[in-house]
Amino acid sequence: MGTPLDQPSLDALFLDARTHNAWLDRPVSDDLLRRIWDLARMGPTSANCSPLRIVFVRSTEAKARLMPALLEGNRAKTMAAPVTAIFGSDTRFYDLLPKLFPHADARAWFAGPDKEAVAAATAFRNGTLQAAYFMLAARALGLDCGPLSGFDNALVDREFFPDGTVRSNFLCNLGHGNPAHLFPRSPRLAFEEACRGA
Amino acid sequence: MGTPLDQPSLDALFLDARTHNAWLDRPVSDDLLRRIWDLARMGPTSANCSPLRIVFVRSTEAKARLMPALLEGNRAKTMAAPVTAIFGSDTRFYDLLPKLFPHADARAWFAGPDKEAVAAATAFRNGTLQAAYFMLAARALGLDCGPLSGFDNALVDREFFPDGTVRSNFLCNLGHGNPAHLFPRSPRLAFEEACRGA
């Protein structure tokens, strides 16, 4: 490593990218979703645990099953999005560790009733990291994101993760955003407000 | 948006980037940490809640305070890193919402004893998202990352967040990695193993 990305790339990832609420009539291909996954999955997780699971909601039928779980203000934009990703975390991620982390018995660090709290925190933390990687990978490949947390997690779990091992984390509409419908950008914290040296 | 990043940028962010365990003797300037923050802070959080707080541990004295909290296997590489970021999440993030989300009374969504669970999950989820943005922003500006979760959170909180409102999430060594000390890359999940359409 060592060579910084150019300014247009930093703009596309961070500085000009916005959370979108309205979508242009441009499709999002399955192939593009796969290419995003193939980038996002390379990001780091602890013990390579990789707990992120995604349902890409695209059909009218599946959108209708999602709708009742959404807060009123999140419904229209989600129904209109070409794809809505449901990001979930697999609470039984450790069953895959013999494959994902073959050089140690990492499953034993998380499996069993006395490890439930650490396994749940690990699933939530690392599933969330991977969801962030996914959103930045989507932007890197030219898509816009509209993440949202305003929904009934239990209802989404029942509809989309019925076997009970995956817990929904948050949703993200994906498509090509319509910049005409953006809200003004909200302020961010200065370095001094959030960071300090030691 | 719309123009994908070029292949070297995708490589630097995702495909060639690795979790590093050994560091070249090259400094990491305070100015670079600020530039990373100025990118990372622009990533999306729910209601712009921005709960990430970072302590950049750089001095010998502060490294010594961090060391007892680390699992044995994480000590040498962390002591050798030019900077170790402690990523924490501010559980009282909602006190800044009148500034960060001025167009609604968002503080009321999270403040108060009956909202503690939703506030804690929001702090953890969004602080983790921002930590992922920070790591990818660090890579985008040419740094390498070495994130790690193997440490005693309560001990770190007592040493570095003594007022009790910020909870440590995970640590990340920052510097220019020495590729000679990389482990072989672990496998990742295929699209079909982690994703499905609906």
Image: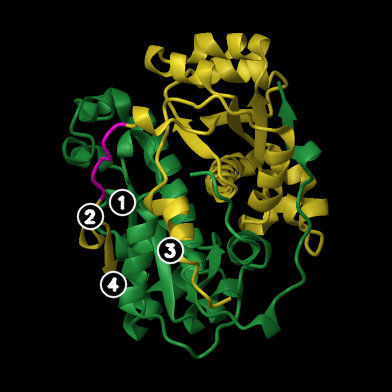
Chain colours: A yellow, B green
Do discs 4 and 3 belong to a common subunit?
yes
What numbered label is drawn on residue A197? 4
Mark nearer the viewer, 3 or 1:
3
Chain bearing tag 1 is B
Q: Residues within 10 Å of mark 1 (few under 14, many from 20)?
A: many
Hey, what amino acid is under mark 2?
A: Asp
Residue A148: image quadrant is top left
Chain bearing tag 3 is A
Mark nearer the viewer, 1 or 2:
1
> In this view of the protein, which residue sits in the foreground, B106 or B12?
B12
> Is residue A187 shown left or right of residue A27?
left
Mark nearer the viewer, 4 or 3:
3
Name the residue tied to disc 3: A7
Q: Residues within 10 Å of mark 2 (few under 14, many from 20)?
A: few
Mark 1 in CB contact with mark 2 (< 8 angstroms): yes
Mark 1 in CB contact with mark 4 (< 8 angstroms): no
Cα–Cα gap, marks 3 and 1: 33 Å
Q: At 65% from the left edge and 21% from the top edge, which residue is drawn? A: A58
What numbered label is drawn on residue B166? 1
- In this rendering, the answer to whether A140 lies above or below A55 is below
Quarter holding the C terminus of chain A is bottom left
Hey, what amino acid is under mark 3?
A: Gln
Expressed as whole percent of the image width and height from the top left, the position of residue B167 reads 36, 51
Cα–Cα gap, marks 1 and 2: 8 Å
Residue at far bottom of view: B25
